[in-house]
Image (cartoon, rainbow, N blue to C red):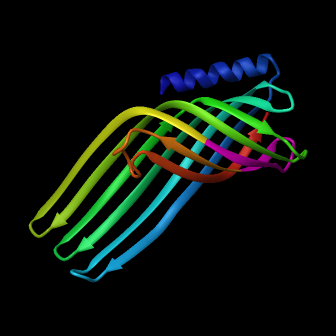
Amino acid sequence: MRIWWASVTLMLATGAAHAQNSDLAILAGISGPRGQVTTAPTTVISGSVGASGEVNYAWQALQRAVDLYIELPLVITGQDRGTVTPGRVSDLSFKDVFFTPGARLKISPQSRVSVYAALGGGIASMGTTMSVVSPGSVSETSNRATTAALDFGGGLDFRLTRLLSLRAEGRDFVTRASLGSAGRNHWMFLAGIAFHF
């Protein structure tokens, strides 16, 4: 985490020194809630809900027909899956963190609207906690794994003022299989605001 803060400080100082255009986006998204009831051969009730948050600092490295930004997206996501069966209640909780510095290419077909594509690589920290309650027994197991991650996606930015915009994006964080809530691919759709300075 110290490396991330040092990188942000260095980029802020470099951007200010060269009068480069920078932005700071704060985005959030949810998945679910989803529920399902199965009655055969036994009754099973299951449900899931998840949420994600992103803080993304970027500075403009090149301004041409297509603008190039260097970005530092930090994404934290969590998901809970609960299952109730006769004599057993279980909860599977995922808490994942992605940090994938990379590049963003932005095109502005209109003065207030721009679209962009992003590609980056870095690390992911994937955490899992399993809790089970059954007659006469309560158990909980936790583990966390750190692995390389690749992210790619795209988005839309709508300027409200010179300093503020609305932003929506979709990103896929790709990791080793069998980690986290979704295996190899971790799709997220987020929306929020971006500050331009």
Instruction: Give the residue at x 64% y 18%.
Output: 10
Label count reads 0
Q: Image point 69% across, 34% down: which residue? A: 104
Residue 65 picture quarter: top right
Q: Is residue 105 left or right of residue 109?
A: left
Q: Main secondary structure of the magenta part?
A: strand
Whole-percent x, y for residue 120 in the image: 58, 32
Q: What residue do we see at 37% from left, 33% from top? A: 146
Q: Is residue 46 magenta?
A: no
Is residue 156 on the magenta stretch? yes
- The residue located at (39%, 38%) in the rendering is 176
> Magenta residues?
153-167
Of 108 and 50, nearer the camera is 108
Residue 151 placement (x, y as % from top left): 55, 38
Relative side of 158 to 141, left or right: right
Question: Split into 4 quadrants, where in the image is the C terminus?
Answer: top right
Q: Is residue 80 above or below residue 5?
A: below
At which x and y percent is residue 39? 28, 83
Q: Please, is residue 171 above or below residue 65 in the view?
A: below
Q: Is residue 135 left or right of residue 18?
A: left
Where residue 63 sits in the image (x, y, percent)? 83, 27
Viewed as shown, does residue 149 lie left or right of 37? right
Asked if 190 appears above or below 89 in the picture, the reply is: above
